[in-house]
Every structure is written in structure tokens, then in C-alpha cells.
Image (spheres, helix red, strand yellow):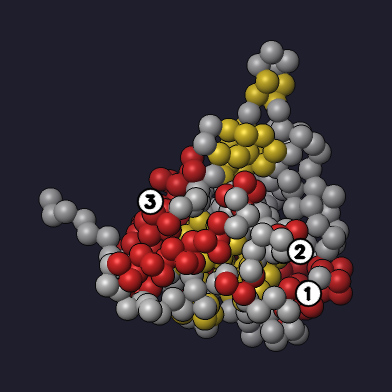
Amino acid sequence: MPQLSVQLNRLKLANPILVASGTFGYAREMAAFVDFKQLGGIIPKTLTAAPRIGNPPPRTVEASSGLLNSIGLDNDGIDAFLAKTLDYLLGLETAIIVNIAGRNTEEFVQMAAKVGQHKQVAGLELNISCPNVSGGVDFGTDPRLAAEVVSQVRNACDLPVIAKLTPNVTSVVEIAQAAAEAGADAVSLVNTFQGMAIDWRRRKPILGNVIGGLSGPAIKPLALRIVWQVAQAVNVPIIGIGGIQSIDDVMEFLIAGATAVQIGTANFYNPGLAQQLVTELSEILTEQNCQSVGDIVGTLQIPAR
């Protein structure tokens, strides 16, 4: 049997198949469909310092081969999560990576310190890339700000730190480099692409927030390109995200340079997919005569020109 465990600097996972923040709730919702301990890890929905009611409806709309969402980080706040939900998650026998979003560096640091007190948490994912809230992408579009928040969060707690980056920039490579140099253990690539939908008969936007984030199969080629570009230029482990719905998609991201992947939009229509992919990954690695996941990571061969 091939070795499925992967190492992302200080973060070790039993296998590289994670479920993405915002697509798996707080896991209770998926208990009927998934054996959680088979997953590489769970990333619950993003937490903010104070409760948020999110954006006005409509919040989602189907797009060609994808989904536009404008949820707006609807959540009960970090204190309620720590008091009511974290213990349940920590009992699921898989890595729990807590995703946080702050309005400023100080909020990120304060939340990181609170989560850091819970040593069973596997890591922190910093959402510096949400396109659906005011100022949500500021940290992810400025290398200096990205480095500042990663560095200060790392100083505030001992947990592994993952920076979740936005594709809505000229060069993701520059932001990833800044995050890596500031001490990020890994980067998640990528969050959603900004988009919109219009009801032309009514002459109005469909989403209540006008602009939303596009996810799903439509963005996979773009996400793959970004993963490959960052893997070529930055010495940091990558978690690939974007339209994964089959084992072939997983293999493409790994070969492009990702060490792990997150399943996102597909959880909405196939909540058992992540567990299925773990089994299929083991089978395909055996078929390819690979001893471990690491044997295929970053093995894309570019023809000579």
C-alpha cells in the first residue's frame, strides 16, 4: 500500500484530501455521508471576531460549470465556535484546521491567540482572500500586508499557518512569496474568482451583494495554472483548490505541484466525494507504482522548446 501521509512544513496530514472552508459547514451536517476519520482534514467555515449575518439574499446562483456565491462570511463568531463547536470537531479523529478572517491584523492576531490555546487544533488557515466582504481581499492583494499578517499570526500562536490566497491579483506568485518569507507553512491556492450574474429582463444583478465568488469546474484550468506557477517560483507547500470533482482532477493538481488539495463546491452535490477520493488515490498510486504521494508531486514534464 502506498504511503498517503503528507507533510506541509509543520503540518502533517494522514492523506492529502481536505474539505474546503465554507463548503462543509461545521461537519455535523455531513455526518450521514462521511466517515470523517478517512479524510485528511476538515476546514470549517470561516470565523470572524464578532458574529456576522452575511450578505443580503440571493446569496448563490448557478453559473456555467460553476457556482457564484456571496455568503459574506455568515457565522456566529469565534467565541461561540470555541465554546459550542470545537470540541465536537476535535472528536472526529481527523485534522481540524480552523479558518479565520479579520478586518485588520490585530483581529487576526487576537483570533489566532484564542485558537492557539487549543493544542489539538492541527493548524490555522488565514482567509485573506474573501471576495464577498468589504476589505476581504486587502491582505491578499498586497505582498506587504500579506507578510505582516502571516508574521504576526505566527508570533501569536504555535499552530502551523496556511495563507489562503486570492486569484484576483496580477501575480499570485508575489503574494505567495511574501507569505512564505513571512513564515507561512503552506499556501492554499486559490479562493474564488470575482464574478457576477445579471437578470437582463429586470436590469438587475441576481446576487444581493452584486458581486460574488466563482467556484467549481469552471475555474479548474485557472487554478491549475496558478498552482503550477507558484510551485515553479516559491519554495512553499501548496494546497490546491478549484473545481476538483474526480480523482483525475486531484492527480492534475498534485502533478502541477500541490502537496494536498481541498474539495469545495463538489461537496454540495456529492458530500461523500472526499472520502471516495482517498480510496481512489490509494488505488491510482498503486497502479502508478508510487510508494508515496510525494512521488508524484510536482512531476509535470514541460516539453523542451
Label 1 with label 2: CB-CB less than 8 Å: yes
Q: Position of residue 238 (x, y in %)?
A: 45, 66
Q: Would you call the spot at circle 2 few (<14 residues within 10 Å), some (14-19), or many (20 or more)?
A: few
Between the C-alphas of marks 2 and 3, the distance is: 34 Å
Between the C-alphas of marks 1 and 2, the distance is: 8 Å
Locate the N terminus and report the quarter of the image it occupies: bottom left
Q: Where does label 2 land, which residue?
A: 28
Say whether disc 2 or disc 3 marks the residue closer to the N-terminus.
2
Q: Position of residue 60 (x, y in %)?
A: 70, 38
Q: Where does label 3 land, which residue?
A: 225
Q: In the image shown, does 62 or 142 lie closer to the viewer? A: 62
Q: Is residue 95 above or below residue 245?
A: below
Which residue is at a point 68% across and 20% down the rendered structure image?
199
- Asked if residue 36 lies left or right of residue 117, the reply is left
- Residue type highlighted by circle 2: Arg
- Asked if residue 123 lies left or right of residue 185, the reply is right
Label 2 with label 3: CB-CB less than 8 Å: no
Q: Where does label 1 land, which residue?
A: 88
- Residue type highlighted by circle 1: Tyr
- Asked if residue 13 lies left or right of residue 68, the reply is left
Q: Nearer the viewer, mark 2 or mark 3?
A: 2
Which residue is at a point 81% across and 70% down the rendered structure image?
85
Q: Is residue 62 above or below residue 43?
A: above
Label 1 with label 3: CB-CB less than 8 Å: no
